[in-house]
Amino acid sequence: MLFKIGEKVSFLHESGWGVIKEIKTDTVLVEDETGFDRPIPLNELVKIYGNQEDRFDDVPLDFSEKEVRANSNNNSRIDDTRKFKDFWEIDLHIHELLDSDLGLSNAEMMRHQISVLKSFFRNASDKRIKKLIIIHGVGQGVLKAEVRAFLQKQDGLEFYDSDFREYGKGATTVELFYR
């Protein structure tokens, strides 16, 4: 593939992106999204076409068509959410939501995760679900903080850390109250 100086590229085997600064025989000097210059082999780059920064804004998700299961210990993945008899559960880890996160910045991944959360929450509220489990992981706590900031803005609910024995420190339980 032919590259030009100034083009935006993503990395084939890692997340992130950069801008081409210099082209050599079989490597390219790329300034990554954090501002560091990195030599990358030509065959490890993918050209980014157009402005894709808003590609995940308000992703429409329809959870109502997904399979409903009885509460079980089966860990098989059911798309983005699992619906049990008495609660709904969603895993917001990016690898659970997307097939690949190659070329996505942390901000883009976070926007997508929060968009999925909002759609999930809206659908659960419409269905008058009384309990939600939101799996956000531990990490550095950024996603957890964003999830809880969203929940604090909502009326008619309580949230708290989920059962440590089942989810560790990486999940939040939400109880919804309806009139």
Image: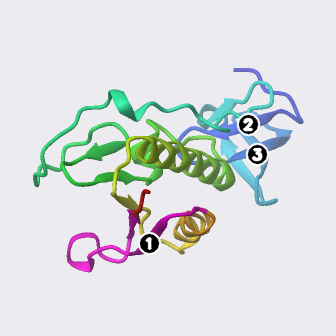
Q: Quadrant of the N terminus?
A: top right
Identify residue type, mark 2.
Answer: Asp
Query: Does 113 appear above or below 43?
Result: below
Q: What segment is highlighted magenta in the picture? A: 154-175
- Expressed as whole percent of the image width and height from the top left, the position of residue 161 reads 38, 77
Other-residue count near label 3 (Cα within 10 Å), few / some / many at <14 / 14–19 / ≥20: many
Q: Which residue is mark 2?
A: 54
Other-residue count near label 1 (Cα within 10 Å), few / some / many at <14 / 14–19 / ≥20: some
Q: Which residue is mark 1?
A: 159
Q: Residue furthest front?
A: 179
Under circle 2, the secondary element is loop
Q: Nearer the viewer, mark 2 or mark 3?
A: 2
**In whole angstroms, how far apart are the C-alphas of marks 2 and 3?**
17 Å
Q: Earlier in the sequence, mark 2 or mark 1?
A: 2
Horizontal side of 73 relative to 161 (left or right) equals left
Q: Quadrant of the C terminus?
A: bottom left
Identify residue type, mark 1.
Answer: Phe
- Expressed as whole percent of the image width and height from the top left, the position of residue 46 reads 65, 31
What residue is drawn where x is 44% and y is 72%? 159
Other-residue count near label 2 (Cα within 10 Å), few / some / many at <14 / 14–19 / ≥20: few
Query: Does 154 appear above or below 47?
Result: below
Identify residue type, mark 3.
Answer: Gly
